[in-house]
Amino acid sequence: MLEQVVNQVLQAQATEQIQAQPYERADERQGYRNGTRPHPLTTRVGTLTLHVPRLRNGTFSTELFARYQRSEQALLLALVEMVIQGVST
């Protein structure tokens, strides 16, 4: 369910960036969609396979994750905290 919600957010962000719905012809359109690419993201819930929109001009950006981020930032912070506290495994 979380995967579906995040994928819908990504599609909405793409729509906002190009200022047009999929297959919509509009004068204010800023670009064109060019499919999606799979992006695995490891979270506390499990691994999510996100379908990140691609734009023809290659300028799609999102604030949900960094460009090459593969895991949730909270997971990395928890691991660093365990190392600092001396947890061995």
Image (cartoon, helix red, strand yellow):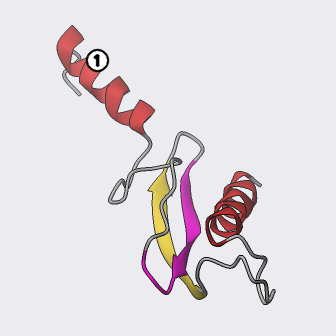
> With 73 as the anchor, is 36 left or right in this view?
right
Q: Nearer the viewer, residue 55 or 20?
A: 20
- The residues colored magenta run 46-58
Judged left or right of residue 64, residue 69 is left
Where is residue 28 shown, x and y percent of the image? 72, 76
The one nearer the camera, 78 or 39, is 39
The structure residue drawn at horizontal position 46% and vertical position 50%, both measured from the top left corner, is: 65
Q: Residue at x 55, y 50 (%)?
A: 46
Task: State the quadrant of the N terminus.
Answer: bottom right
User: Along the horizontal axis of the image, is 49 left or right of 88?
Assistant: right
Q: Amino acid at mark 1?
A: Glu
78 w.r.t. 65: above or below: above
Mark 1, Cα crowd under 10 Å, few <14 / some 14-19 / many 20+, is: few
* Residue 18 pos. (x, y %): 64, 72
Specify the quadrant of the image occupied by residue 10. bottom right
- Identified at 56% across, 66% down, the residue is 49
Residue nearest the viewer, comparing 16 with 80: 16
Residue 37 covered by magenta stretch? no
- Residue 23 at x, y percent in the picture: 78, 90
From the image, tell me which residue sits under label 1: 81
Nearer-the-camera pick, 18 or 46: 18
From the image, which quarter does the C terminus lie in?
top left
* Furthest-top residue in this view: 85
Residue 54 versus residue 85 in the image, above or below = below
Residue 63 drawn at (x, y percent):
51, 47
Question: Residue placed farthest to the front in the image?
Answer: 27
Helix, strand or loop: magenta stretch: strand
Residue at disc 1, secondary structure: helix
